[in-house]
Image (cartoon, rainbow, N blue to C red):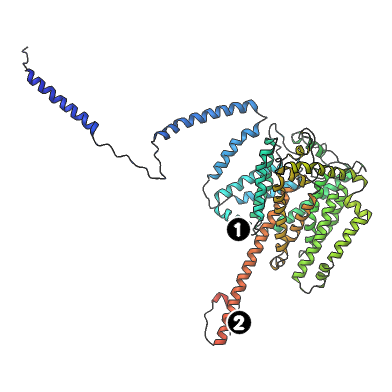
């Protein structure tokens, strides 16, 4: 094979040419123009950035590790710490509700259905008959209706701008009331940090948002609609009939009607539930004290005392004769139940309701019929009437015993005075508050004892401090003021449903008096519903007054234009809609 002869010079030239080609290509890649970085305009982000790629990789690992620890400790502590471990799930649920988009229709019908179910179960179902699973709070009928109602309320607030607008408009009719109410809610949560039993205080505060706050907000929206207030008040009076019947039967039987007939799955192993299931008698006299569907005879007396102004209103109002006769017969039946329950509290609320309604009736009749002699006689003779009632309660032994009690009630009166003396130094020591459900411990009772505080204002002052008790009183005081002022307006006097503002204001006044001697919260949900009714009816009165004033202004302008045309002899254009009711010339 012949050998190729290549000179050294040509070889070096070829190697140099090849190297120049390789070097040119490498140099072009190194020294070429750099690509222009793409700029991402806000609010867009660059998902291909390094930090986002790290998050995509690290977040699943961190979430999996958290779930592993969460499941381990849940299995280790269940069923004793189910409620604390449910908090992350609740937070995620709230975030999901907050992120929901706006919708044209909100689930308001289902919310109102649950609202009515809560109020009905509050009255006719004993709250101490409930499911008690280990590690969970009592599953009562009120909670079975209140929790889904609150869930639907949050959905309506999150997804419906119309719902929020209507709610804002209604609350604006009572300025100051909603501010005091928001402050009262804030104190319930802010005082949790001062509690010695934080889990118990958190549970109490959350339940109050369901039973009080959510009920008030739903009531404000529901009773905007005409006819709802009268329908629900009629429902309250109808529900008092089975309560009165059970009271009569229980007083005759001398024990609860369902004693010995309660299924095992509804029995609660709790001192409060056990005390509610036992028969109650007055120690000094041995008289049996009926309590019907409530936890005690005082709870029964409070509810019936709050129903008294509505029974009187329907008895003397512009209703059908059969309704007026039935409600008139209901008043002595209510008073008889106070005797069967041996409830001085109920009698006090009954007297407050009667005395205040007489005054309201006289004022409303006087504003409605200026020349009514009966209304004028009632109003001008009211101081004498009130003084006679006060004289009878103070100096006539039988009436004094009914209201203030005698020797048989001396122990109860002494206990209330002793609790007041115990509470005042504790309140002065910490006027900020000791946290929800901590009033008994703050007064010095042991954690294992059955704690009961008779004065609800002591409970408010010790649990929520000075700000809490002032905001609570301001909320209900402003509601009474707005309700009473609107009840005697011409708009309310012409509308039968709006006239319910009078008994509603009286019921709230009786409630504030009753709370001075009764601290249990059996009827609080009902009272916050009535608070919402007053706010909604006051808003409707303000809307009607604004509409009437605008119509009067238009009518005055029309009359002025017609008079000017008649005097000048010229033709002045007048809107057709404003002259339809005028006679043809």
Q: Please tell me in which quadrant of the rendered image residue 444 appears.
A: top right
Residue drawn at x 67%, y 45% as measured from the top left:
187
User: Total number of numbered labels?
Assistant: 2
Q: Is residue 6 above or below residue 256?
A: above
Nearer to the camera, 351 or 201: 201
Discs 1/2, front = 1
| Res 409 visible | yes
Q: Please tell me in which quadrant of the rendered image residue 1 appears.
A: top left
Nearer to the camera, 446 or 157: 446
Q: Is residue 200 above or below residue 122?
A: above
> Horizontal and vertical percent for residue 229?
70, 57
Q: Secondary structure at mark 2?
A: loop
| Res 580 visible | no
Q: CA distance from mark 1 to mark 2?
A: 39 Å
Characterize the local packing of mark 1: few (<14), some (14-19) or many (20 or more) Cα atoms within 10 angstroms.
Answer: few
- Left/right placement of residue 208 relative to residue 62 reads right
> Horizontal and vertical percent for residue 115?
67, 49
Nearer to the camera, 116 or 435: 435
Q: Please tell me in which quadrant of the rendered image residue 553 appears.
A: bottom right
Q: Earlier in the sequence, mark 1 or mark 2?
A: 1
- Left/right placement of residue 80 relative to residue 389 reads left
Nearer to the camera, 386 or 299: 386
Q: Secondary structure at mark 1?
A: helix
Residue drawn at x 52%, y 50% as measured from the top left:
102
Residue under numbered circle 1: 169
Residue under numbered circle 2: 583
- Left/right placement of residue 527 relative to residue 517 reads left
Residue drawn at x 70%, y 68% as measured from the top left:
490
Characterize the local packing of mark 2: few (<14), some (14-19) or many (20 or more) Cα atoms within 10 angstroms.
Answer: few
> Horizontal and vertical percent for residue 414?
87, 44
> Horizontal and vertical percent for residue 130?
73, 38
Q: Check the image and name the residue furthest to the top.
A: 1
């Amino acid at each position: 094979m012949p050998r190729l002869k290549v000179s050294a010079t040509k070889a070096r030239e070829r190697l140099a040419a090849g190297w120049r080609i390789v070097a040119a290509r490498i140099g072009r890649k190194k020294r070429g123009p750099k690509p222009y970085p793409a700029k991402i305009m806000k609010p867009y982000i660059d998902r291909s950035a390094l930090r986002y790629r790290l998050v995509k990789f690290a977040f699943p690992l961190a979430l999996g590790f958290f779930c592993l620890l969460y499941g381990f400790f849940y299995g280790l502590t269940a069923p004793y710490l189910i409620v604390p471990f449910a908090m992350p799930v609740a937070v995620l649920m709230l975030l999901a509700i907050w992120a929901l988009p706006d919708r044209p229709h909100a689930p308001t019908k289902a919310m109102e259905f649950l609202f009515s179910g809560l109020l009905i179960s509050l009255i006719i179902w004993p709250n101490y008959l409930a499911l008690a699973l280990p590690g969970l709070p009592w599953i009562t009928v009120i909670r079975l209706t209140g929790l889904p109602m609150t869930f639907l309320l949050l959905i309506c607030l999150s997804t419906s701008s119309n719902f929020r607008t209507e709610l804002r408009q209604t609350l604006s009719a009572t300025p100051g009331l909603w501010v005091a109410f928001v402050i009262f809610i804030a104190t319930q949560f802010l005082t949790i940090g001062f509690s010695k039993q934080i889990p118990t205080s958190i549970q109490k505060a959350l339940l109050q948002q369901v039973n009080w706050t959510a009920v008030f907000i739903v009531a404000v929206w529901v009773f905007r609609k005409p006819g709802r207030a009268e329908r629900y008040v009629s429902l309250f009076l109808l529900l008092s009939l089975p309560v009165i019947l059970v009271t009569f039967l229980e007083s005759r039987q001398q024990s609860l009607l369902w004693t010995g007939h309660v299924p095992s799955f509804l029995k609660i192993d709790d001192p409060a539930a056990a005390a509610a299931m036992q028969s109650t008698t007055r120690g000094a006299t041995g008289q049996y004290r009926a309590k019907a569907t409530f936890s005690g005879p005082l709870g029964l007396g409070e509810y019936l005392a709050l129903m008294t102004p509505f029974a009187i209103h329907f008895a003397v109002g512009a209703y059908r004769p059969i309704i007026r006769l039935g409600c008139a017969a209901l008043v002595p039946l209510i008073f008889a139940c106070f005797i069967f329950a041996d409830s001085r509290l109920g009698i006090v609320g009954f007297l407050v309701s009667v005395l205040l309604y007489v005054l309201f009736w006289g004022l409303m009749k006087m504003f409605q019929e200026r020349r009514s002699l009966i209304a004028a006689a009632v109003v001008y003779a009211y101081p004498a009437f009130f003084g006679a009632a006060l004289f009878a309660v103070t100096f006539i032994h039988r009436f004094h015993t009914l209201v203030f009690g005698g020797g048989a009630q001396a122990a109860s009166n002494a206990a209330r005075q002793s609790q007041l003396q115990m509470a005042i130094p504790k309140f002065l020591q910490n006027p900020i508050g000791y946290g929800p459900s901590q009033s008994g411990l703050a007064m010095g009772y042991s954690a294992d004892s059955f704690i009961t505080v008779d004065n609800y204002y002591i409970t408010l002052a010790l649990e929520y401090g000075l700000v809490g008790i002032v905001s609570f009183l301001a909320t209900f005081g402003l509601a009474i003021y707005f309700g009473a002022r609107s009840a005697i307006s011409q708009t309310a006097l012409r509308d039968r449903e709006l006239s319910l503002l009078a008994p509603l204001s009286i019921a709230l006044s009786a409630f504030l008096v009753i709370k001075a001697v009764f601290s249990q919260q059996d009827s609080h949900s009902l009272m916050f519903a009535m608070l919402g009714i007053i706010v909604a009816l006051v808003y409707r009165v303000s809307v009607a007054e604004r509409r009437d004033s605008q119509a009067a202004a238009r009518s005055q302008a029309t009359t002025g234009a017609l008079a000017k045309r008649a005097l000048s002899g010229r033709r002045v254009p007048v809107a057709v809609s404003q002259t339809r009711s005028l006679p043809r010339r």
